[in-house]
Every structure is written in structure tokens, then in C-alpha cells.
Amino acid sequence: MMVRGTFSLVILTTILCIIGFSSHALKEDSFNDRKASTFMSQINSRKMFRGINIGNALEAPTEGAWGVYIRDEYFSIIKNAGFDTVRIPIRWSAHAKQSKPYTIAESFFKRVDHVINKSLEQGLITIINMHHYDEIMQNPTSHKERFLEMWRQIAERYKDYPEDLYFELLNEPHGELTDSVWNQILKEAISIIRKTNPIRKIIIGPANWNSVYNLEMLEVPEDPNIIVTFHFYTPFEFTHQGAEWVNPSPPVGRKWTGTEDEKNQIRRELDIAYEWSKRHDNITLFMGEFGAYSKADMESRARWTCFVAREAEKRGIAWCYWEFCSGFGAYDPIRKKWREELLDALVPRVEFYVSVETDHGSFTGEGWYEKGSYATIRFEEVKIGFPIAYILDHFEGLKAEDRIVDEKTVEVYVDEDRVVKAVWRKDYTLLILLIFILVCIISCVVIILYRKRG
Ligand code: BGC
């Protein structure tokens, strides 16, 4: 009787244990149901940082005349390469009537609308300027009215466009457009634009080809939405060697090796802009053009480009490389590929380390990854050990951008150094089954012995 009671108790306890453990296991969320922890989505500051000019296109006498026609896909190519800004030089003066009211051709406006839209669609800050208005450089007095009237039309046309569209008044004022004459005209242009675009970002630059040495003479109107630009091609003999449009053209063969003297020359000039901005309420600076012509050797160009870009960034100066796919081109439009040396110089590849913490199991995927890519972490098994098993339960340290592929694989988004923790839980099912079998065997043995005795 006593043995029979003990036997029933053992069986009952074993069954209860099995039910208890398996329901505990079922309560755990399955991998598919488990949501990655939600993270605050990154705040997009919309600030200009790294840009590129699509030059030699719309500022040519007609688009295509200088070999560049802006293709829609250029904007995604630029965006995907890591740029946030595009500057589109435009020769409005070639498409406006010579006499009052200086009407800009509707067909040209439509083309510019399209280009701007394609750029904005990619989330790029889009700067349109007035480029190669050569006549105003020679004769500001007789071209001032036409200049202002063109801006009146442009401002009216784009007044309802998103704030990511910026206006830049005039590329590289020079010649008869001296500091004082330019100061006067730019003030008038800004007040015309402000009538229809009260808060749009307006970019202005000093005379003498947007030289840092003329910042001191630039009069900046009181307006919180003004950005000040300058262009940077120092040393000119290096960046413009063999340039056909420069007379006399600096001889080719000059290298830029990055000696301390060469670096200091660049630092000194950038400091002029930086110091000037500090003295003017830290007004936002924009290095709207910099680049080295393709007649210089690639190694020097890449070295110079990288140095200038980083030095500008150190001073908080946003920049725009001159230019995308023509003579200075960072992109080769024939091979449809970036010139890697220049792209790397402009937007350095950033790599982060993805590591895995785990108490059990083996996995692949730990290592260095490029920013913006996904690292695939894959465990070889989800269950190990005997008779107590370890089951891969879930991953900790995930972000909303990460992707859970299956129960042993996760794709980790690389935006910083990442640590993914694999959490395992103990599983007693097998052990209990073994105990149960053992108990059964023992019970059977006891019963047999008991019967034999009886
Ligand atoms: C001019 C281009 C020239 C570049 C570098 C730009 O502002 O518009 O024609 O290639 O400067 O000199």
C-alpha cells in the first residue's frame, strides 16, 4: 500500500513538473513576436554640412553646351554618397529678356523647377544661385535693375518651396562690382526677396571672387537667415594648373604634398573666415566652392581636397565641392562611378565595430563595418547542452533600425559601435524526461519486486 502511494506521488510530481516547465517555456515570446526596442529616431537637423556643385550644366550658355546635362539620378547618387547639399549654378541672365520687365523664359523656369524638385525629393539642401552674370561685373550700374528684377521673379516663383531651398545672390562678384557697389546692390536684392520669402536662407559672399580677404568689407544686413559664402582655391597655381579659362594658365606638374608650409597657408586663410565670423555673431559660413582641376595629379588632388575639407569642418564651416562630373569632377559620368580617391577625401568612410556578448554558442559576424551598412550576426545553433539545454532566447541592445531575420540571425544597423547581447535561457525538458523515465523504471522494478515477494 505504502509503495503504491509513493509510486503515485512520484508520477504526479513528475507530470506537474513537466507541465510547469513547458508552460514557462511557452510564456516566453517567440522570436518573431519580439519587437526590437524602440529608439528615438534620429533628429534630422537639416543643417548644411557636406555638399557638391553640379557645375558646368545650367550655368553654361545653354544646358549641355559644356558637356553636362543634369540627369535626375544624379541627386540620388549624390545623396547616397553621403552629401547633404547640392549647389546648382544657374546662368539666369542667358534666359531673361534684355529689356524690361526682363522676363525669364517659362521653359527655362520649368527646367529649373524640375531640377530643384528632383534634388529636394532626395532630401538635399538645394542652393540655386545666379552664376556667370558677367555683364554685371563689367557694368553694375546698367545691369543692377535687371539683376534685381530677375531675383524678384525667382523669389516669386519659389516662395512656397520648402525651406531646404536656399538662394545665393551672385557667384563671385568681381571687376567693377567692387565691395561698396556690391554692398549696395545686395541689400536691395535681399529686401526684394524678403517681400515674398521672409525667412528663406539667403547666401551672400564678398567681392573679389568671394575671397576671404574681402570679408572685412562685406556689409551683412541684420537678418537671421543670411549665410556668408567664400570660395577657396589656395594655392591657385596648384588648383588651377592647366585651366584653359585662366590667362595665363598656371603650368601643370605642381604637386601638393602636404608639407607644414602648405598646410599652414590653408589654415591661415580659413582662419581669416573663421575669425571674421566670430567677430560677426558667429554668422554661418559656407565654403561654396573648393576643388582642384583634373590636370593636377590625382594623389595631390585627393590629399589637398581631404585636408581643406577637414580643416573647414574643424572650424564648423559647411562646404560644397567644385564640382560633380566635369573638369574637377568627383564623379565619372562615362563610367558612372565615383572617383574613389576624391569621394574618400570628401566623405571619409567611417567604420564602427560590431561585437557580440554571449555565454554560449558560436556565431559569425563580429567585426568592423562601414557606417550605414548592416552587420549580419548569425548563431550556429539555438539549442546546446545536455541534459540541461541552453536555448537562444533573444537579443538585447537592438535598435528600431535592426532587423531580426530568424531565431538565430539578426542584422544590426551600423551607426556607431554596437554591442549585441545574446540572452540564453535554461531548458529542463530533457532532464525532466530523463527523471521521469528513471522514476518509471524504478517504480516498475519496485512493483515487480513487491509482486514477487507477495
Ligand atoms: C566658375 C567655373 C570655374 C570654377 C573654378 C566657378 O565659379 O564658374 O567656371 O571652373 O569657378 O575656377
Image (tube, helix red, strand yellow):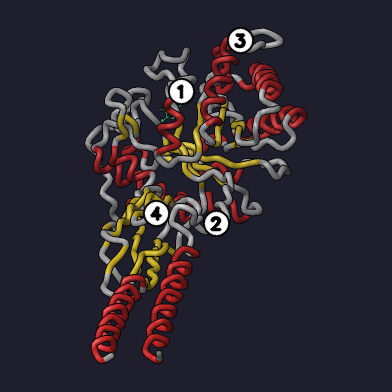
- Whole-percent x, y for residue 253 in the image: 22, 36
Q: Residues within 10 Å of mark 4 (few under 14, many from 20)?
A: many
Q: Mark 2 = which residue?
A: 38
Whether the residue carrying mark 2 lies under 8 Å from ligand 1 is answered with no
Q: Mark 1 or mark 3, which has the lower sequence index?
A: 1
Q: Mark 1 or mark 2, which has the lower sequence index?
A: 2
Q: Mark 1 = which residue?
A: 72
Q: Nearer the viewer, residue 11 or 232?
A: 11
Q: Mark 2 or mark 4, which has the lower sequence index?
A: 2
- Whole-percent x, y for residue 120 in the image: 56, 31
Question: Could you tell me the amino acid type at mark 1?
Answer: Asp
Q: Secondary structure at mark 2?
A: loop
Q: Is residue 402 left or right of residue 328?
A: right
Quarter of image, ligand 1: top left
Residue 384 lies, with reference to residue 200, above or below; the image says below
Q: Nearer the viewer, residue 18 or 93?
A: 18
Q: Is residue 326 left or right of residue 154?
A: left
Question: Could you tell me the amino acid type at mark 3?
Answer: Ala
Q: Mark 4 or mark 3, which has the lower sequence index?
A: 3
Question: Could you tell me the amino acid type at mark 2?
Answer: Thr
Residue at 42% from the left image edge and 50% from the top image edge: 403
Q: Nearer the viewer, mark 1 or mark 3?
A: 1
Q: Mark 3 = which residue?
A: 105
Residue at 65% from the left image edge and 37% from the top image edge: 201
Question: Could you tell me the amino acid type at mark 4?
Answer: Val
Disc 4 to disc 3, how far (Cα)? 51 Å
Disc 1 to disc 2, how far (Cα)? 35 Å
Any mark on residue 36, and which? none
